[in-house]
Image (cartoon, helix red, strand yellow):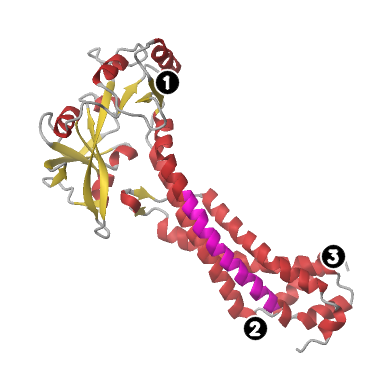
């Protein structure tokens, strides 16, 4: 009999005894499902954050920071010099579409469990809304320059209590009035906006965190960089909005990925050891029938392959169950870890990775039992108790 037919017969024999081994098989399935579910849900957190970080970014918007990996303070003279560069677009009145952004932070409590979180308050110039036309007020009104007023992004409002119209938030011991809500670009929606000069005066700050520019055209970035290099007073870095946002979120997403793989690896190790033990038990229960088949001509190689396929088939329902649970609990839902509001998306790539882990656990868990099944002498196996 050909090896392929021998493998098929061995699998059919194994399937015939599923009822008697249902309990141990369910243990493997649930263990694999837990690993896959945790891996997919946690990796989806990182992929969703990466996607959100660059959502709404435009290729003609540029973020300019001072030198170094993390940027630094940028004074008013630098902001003015950047505004005068030829690559920067002008509005209808000839004013450059350039705005410095200053930063403050406030604390609130998560709506879901009351845990304290910190969120950013960005101080922006009057032309910022021309540079980022996607931003629009959904209710209330725009903040007024010179007054301690803020508008809050809808993502932050949804995730945090105490940010409704008329509420006051505390920042450096001062009250700021919520006068409106807005939506538009994801990374801005997860905080609040106010007037830059008012914020800097309240915080006694004299520098900006970075500058947002809008270019004459998408292809003007190289021209902008050349102008910056030609000016010896400018020691800054310019990159497109999406690259800047991806770089800013990289540290957190890498941390989330590391935690995901670490936890899943520990769980997978336990699940794989359990799979090995259960497959040994299954093989021991079927020792006589497998020895009988080998005695009538079934080879060692088909036996190894059949046991490995059986282990994979046991792991596969666990993968499907883990994917289904992660999809139902997280896809399309919003979570708020470490103060961030993340719209979760379970992508096909993450699902494929989770299924791959499940099949790897099945393959590794079945390897030693498969070798044992093929290596036991036929005479010894036939003498084993039924």
The disc at residue 3 is 3
- In percent of the image, x 67 and y 73: which residue is there? 279
For label 1, count other residues whose C-alpha is less than 10 Å away and answer few (under 14), some (14-19) or many (20+).
some
Residue found at the very far bottom of the displayed protein: 385
Q: Is residue 280 magenta?
A: yes
Q: Are marks 2 and 1 in contact (CB under 8 Å)?
A: no
* Spatial CA span between label 3 and label 1: 61 Å
Q: Which residue is mark 1?
A: 218
The disc at residue 20 is 2
Main secondary structure found in the magenta portion: helix
Q: Are marks 2 and 3 in contact (CB under 8 Å)?
A: no
Relative image position of residue 367 (x, y in whole percent): 72, 66
Upstream in sequence: badge 2 or badge 3: 3
Which element type, helix, strand or loop, lies under badge 2? helix
Relative image position of residue 146 (x, y in whole percent): 10, 29
Relative image position of residue 72 (x, y in whole percent): 33, 29
Relative image position of residue 179 (x, y in whole percent): 13, 40
Please state which of residues 264 and 75 is positioned toward the viewer in this rendering.
Answer: 75
- In percent of the image, x 24 and y 15: which residue is there? 95
Upstream in sequence: badge 3 or badge 1: 3
The disc at residue 362 is none
Q: Can residue 346 be seen here? A: no
Q: Is residue 60 magenta?
A: no
Does 322 sit above or below residue 98?
A: below
* Spatial CA span between label 2 and label 1: 67 Å
Q: Are marks 3 and 1 in contact (CB under 8 Å)?
A: no
Q: Can residue 158 be seen here? A: yes
State the extent of the magenta-drawn residues as a range.
Answer: 257-282
């Amino acid at each position: 009999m050909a090896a392929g037919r021998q493998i098929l017969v061995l699998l059919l024999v194994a399937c015939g005894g599923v009822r008697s081994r249902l309990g141990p098989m369910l243990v493997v399935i649930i263990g694999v499902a837990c690993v896959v579910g945790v891996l997919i849900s946690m990796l989806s957190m990182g992929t969703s954050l990466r996607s959100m970080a660059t959502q709404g970014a435009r290729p003609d918007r540029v973020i300019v920071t001072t030198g170094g990996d993390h940027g630094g303070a940028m004074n008013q003279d630098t902001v003015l010099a950047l505004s005068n560069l030829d690559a920067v677009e002008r509005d209808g009145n000839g004013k450059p579409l350039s705005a410095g952004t200053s930063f403050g932070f406030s604390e609130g409590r998560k709506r879901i469990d009351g845990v304290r979180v910190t969120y950013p308050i960005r101080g922006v110039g009057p032309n910022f809304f021309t540079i980022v036309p996607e931003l629009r007020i959904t209710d209330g009104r725009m903040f007024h320059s010179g007054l301690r007023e803020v508008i809050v992004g809808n993502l932050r409002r949804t995730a945090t209590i105490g940010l409704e119209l008329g509420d006051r938030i505390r920042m450096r011991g001062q009250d700021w009035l919520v006068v409106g809500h807005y939506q538009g670009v994801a990374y801005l929606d997860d905080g609040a906006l106010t007037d830059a000069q008012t914020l800097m005066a309240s915080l006694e700050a004299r520098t900006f965190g970075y500058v947002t520019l809008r270019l004459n055209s998408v292809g003007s970035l190289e021209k902008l960089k050349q102008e910056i290099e030609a000016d010896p007073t400018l020691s800054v870095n310019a990159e497109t909005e999406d690259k800047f946002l991806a770089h800013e979120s990289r540290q957190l997403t890498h941390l989330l990925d590391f935690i995901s793989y670490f936890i899943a690896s520990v769980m997978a190790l336990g699940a794989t050891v359990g799979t090995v033990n259960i497959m040994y038990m299954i093989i021991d229960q079927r020792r006589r029938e497998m020895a009988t088949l080998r005695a009538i001509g079934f080879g060692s190689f088909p036996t190894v392959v059949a046991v490995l396929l059986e282990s994979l088939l046991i792991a596969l329902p666990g993968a499907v169950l883990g994917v289904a649970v992660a999809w139902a609990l997280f896809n399309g839902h919003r979570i708020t870890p470490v103060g961030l509001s993340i719209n979760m998306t379970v992508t096909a790539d993450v699902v494929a990775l989770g299924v791959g882990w499940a099949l790897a656990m099945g393959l590794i868990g079945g390897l030693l039992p498969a070798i044992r099944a093929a290596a036991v002498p036929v005479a010894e196996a036939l003498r084993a108790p039924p």
